Amino acid sequence: MGFAYDNEGSSPVYASDTYRGDYQLSEIETKTIHTLRLNNQFKIAINYHSFANVLIYPWGYLEQNTQDKKTYFYFSQDLTQYSDYGYGLNSETLGYPINGTADDYLYQNGVISFTFECGGPELTDEESFWPLQNKIQPICGQMLYQNIRALWLPQ
């Protein structure tokens, strides 16, 4: 959902960091997610990125909530209760547009989907994208509750 919505949230330029592919599901990574979804009955999905301490939920391509905004809000409150993670739409948490995301695609297909941006406010931008070795275990430890709790949410 939202593939190529605009050229700000993704790029048609192959060399870009936000290259989206030539058409929807054209890239091997997106084909793999699509196949994985078709072959399983997922109720929830969690995507991980590195940079900040936030939890992002759909819609990414629009600056508006889904019809399940209350579910996302309550799940996000629960998942972040033991961390310093903020939560919300991408425009609310990171402040820039995105489109064609796994979260939007999975949600459109009946899966509650989140993206955890894992990093840390005490880290520099470079360290957040590529954490130092001594920061990796603490970042993973901070995610433990969120990961275990997410398994029980869609019951």
Image (cartoon, rainbow, N blue to C red):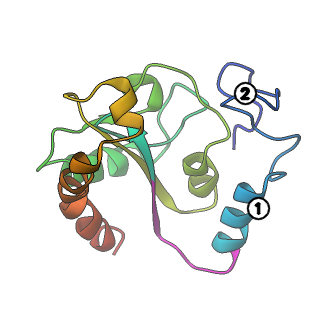
Q: Give the range drawn in magenta.
A: 38-47
Report if the CB atoms under discs 2 and 1 are less than 8 Å apart. Answer: no
**Residue 99, horizontal then vertical, whole percent:** 65, 34
Is residue 136 positioned above or below 9 on the image?
below
**On the image, which quarter does residue 54 sit in?**
top left
**Residue 41, horizontal then vertical, whole percent:** 56, 78
Q: Is 68 displayed left or right of 71 in the figure?
A: right
Number of residues whose C-alpha sits closer than 10 Å to that of mark 1, classed few (under 14), some (14–19) or many (20 or more): few
Which callout, 2 or 1, points at the residue further toward the start of the chain?
A: 2
Residue 150 belongs to the span the image colors magenta: no
Residue tagged by mark 1?
31
| Label 2: which secondary element | loop
| Label 1: which secondary element | helix
Q: Residue at x 67, y 31 (%)?
A: 18
Q: Residue 16 carries which label?
A: 2
**Residue 155, horizontal then vertical, whole percent:** 33, 75
Q: Residue 15 carries which label?
A: none
Nearer-the-camera pick, 55 or 66: 55
